[in-house]
Amino acid sequence: MSTAARSGCARSWAKRSPNRRKSRVAGSGRNVENIRRLKGINMDKTNAAVIGLGSMGFGMAVSLARKGFDVAGTDVNAEAVQRFAAHGRAARSIAEAATGAAILVVVVVNAAQTRTVLFGPEGAANALPKGAVVISSATMSPKDAEALAAEAEARGLLYLDAPISGGAQRAAEGALTVLASGSDAAFAKAQPALDAMAQKLYKLGDKPGIGAAFKMVNQLLAGVHIAAACEAITFAKRLGLDIGKVYEVITAAAGNSWMFENRVPHILEGDYSPKSAVDIFTKDLGIVLDMSRDTKFPTPIAGQAFQMFMMTAAAGMGRDDDASVARLYAQIAGLDLPSSIKSNG
């Protein structure tokens, strides 16, 4: 899954036209209700908005709509917004989507994009009614989550630090795992939406930043396991083994991992269309290494995995599937992997 696919943010949220500022609405009450009626919002349903209709955000928005929410969605990718119109309200701007929403789900790439979505010139914070909850699902450092939460709360909003795991298919099924932390009030306000989007919800603490820290531990493991899976399967190729049979054996043996089982089929099929992109892990493992330096804790294995993703990106495969690390190994070793069906490179 590419950075653009995951977030719908191939272009910066900050580049939205200033002519759209007129759609911003502050506060709540009668004026918001009137605008909601004018915009066709169903007053009998809980109003939610999803910012970022990439492969994850789109599935989350559809899951909310399937469970009876009145959902507005927007994205910098106009095609994604148009596609969402079959499931909910296609909003032309962040402020339009956020107007009158009780729940705002932000599914973009990183902390910088989350900040722009919430507090930029066209930000959602000015359009949300007081007491609305922000469900922030981008992967970011705990410090960034804490800072965003503090600013949101200063504006009268609730903030739930809620990174996600599970992939696009589980997002579409409403079966994600959510690693959440925040106040009791934020959890209570967000609970109906979380029930719609998640199969597993972990309530990890009462302060934003805890969920982000858990997610970074997950991303450390995920990145290391992907790199190891790619190394192992190309090593098997060098040994002259049938890599299809290697996959069959390893998935039934102690050396298996979730990432080996999930990513190696991409290699066997020669399909590097992005389910999760190399660039995602240069970002996430970069955050891990920043946190490692800040806490003076060594992470040499994560550092090696980071370099493998960085080399793969430098070789022109940053927007391809993260299983492309195997292609880098194959190029270095002069090996032929199954022919590519699709790629972004």
Image (cartoon, rainbow, N blue to C red):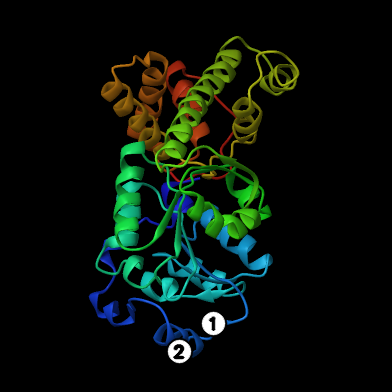
Front in this rendered view, residue 102 or 136: 102
Q: Is residue 41 above or below residue 55?
A: below
Q: Of the residues tagged 2 and 1, which is closer to the observer?
A: 2
Q: Is residue 70 above or below residue 229?
A: below
Residue at 37% x, 14% y is 300
Please give the label number shown on residue 171: none
Residue at 59% x, 54% y is 194
In the rendered image, which residue does mark 2 sit on? 34
- Which image quadrant is residue 61 in? bottom right
Q: Amino acid at mark 1?
A: Ile
Q: Is residue 141 at all visible to an observer of this figure?
A: no
Q: Is residue 269 at all visible to an observer of this figure?
A: yes
Instruction: Point out the image quarter for the C terminus.
Output: top left
Q: Amino acid at mark 2?
A: Asn
Estimate the x, y position of residue 330 in percent, counting from the top left.
Answer: 49, 22
Say left or right for 245 vs 265.
right
Front in this rendered view, residue 128 or 233: 128
In the rendered image, which residue does mark 1 sit on? 41
Estimate the x, y position of residue 1 in percent, counting from the top left.
Answer: 51, 45
Secondary structure found at label 2: helix
Say left or right for 187 vs 143.
right
- Which image quadrant is residue 318 in? top left
Q: CA distance from mark 2 to mark 1?
A: 10 Å
Front in this rendered view, residue 29 or 169: 29
* Label 1 crowd (10 A; few <14 / some 14-19 / many >=20): many
Q: Is residue 35 above or below residue 92?
A: below
